[in-house]
Image (cartoon, rainbow, N blue to C red):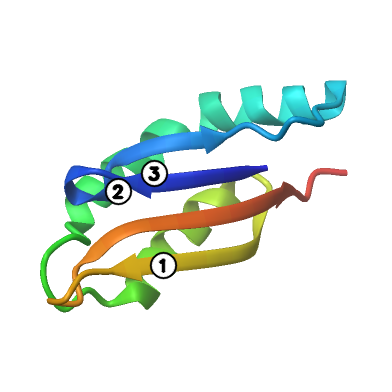
Amino acid sequence: MKFKLSGVLCSKLDIIDDAEQTPGHSREMTRFRHECYEPIVKAMIKLRPADKYTDLSEVWNTVNNILVKHSYKIVNSEFHTDERDGLTDAEFEITSIEE
């Protein structure tokens, strides 16, 4: 599953819907929406990652801590910054680590 943070303070979270959904994938997306969506948005507002000279490790660690708490792990991440090194958007590919 993939999601993107963008917008003001990178507090807009969009789930990137893969075309090949399985029932398990759909349940994983629903669980993510219920458990992780709001905490990530609130954390981004508090962190203010769009300010200049963004410490990308803080963004990654903040998102990762929320995900791990809810049994997800980051598989891949990509960050985009502007000319002031302010975060414009970030994409995360995650997977469930529930057994």
Q: Residue at 11% across / 72% down in the picture?
A: 52
Q: Residue at x 53, y 31 (%)?
A: 35
* Badge 2: residue crowd in 10 Å (few <14, some 14–19, many ≥20): some
Q: For the C terminus, give its image quadrant.
A: top right
Q: CA distance from mark 3 to mark 2?
A: 5 Å
| Neighbours of disc 3 within 10 Å: few (<14), some (14-19), many (20+) | many
If the image is split into quadrants, where does the N terminus sit?
Answer: top right
Relative to the observer, which residue lies in front, 30 or 89? 89
Residue 75 as seen in the image, left or right of residue 4:
right
Give the numbered dot on residue 68.
none
| Dot 3 and dot 1 residues touching (CB under 8 Å) | no
How packed mark 1 is, by other alpha carbons closer than 10 Å (few <14, some 14-19, many 20 or more), is some
Q: Which mark is residue 43?
A: 2
Q: Are marks 3 and 2 in contact (CB under 8 Å)?
A: yes
Amino acid type, mark 1: Phe
Eyeballing the image, is 8 above or below 31? below
Q: Is residue 66 above or below residue 41?
A: below
Q: Position of residue 76 (x, y in %)?
A: 63, 65
Q: CA distance from mark 3 to mark 1?
A: 16 Å
Disc 2, SS: helix
* Residue 67 visible in rendering: yes
Q: Nearer the viewer, mark 2 or mark 1?
A: 1
On the picture, is 95 further left or further right than 41?
right
On the image, numbered disc 3 is attached to which residue? 40
x, y (%) of residue 83?
16, 76
Reading the chain from its start, which is encountered first: label 3 or label 1? Answer: 3
User: Along the horizontal axis of the image, is 44 left or right of 8?
Assistant: right
Residue at image mark 1 = 79
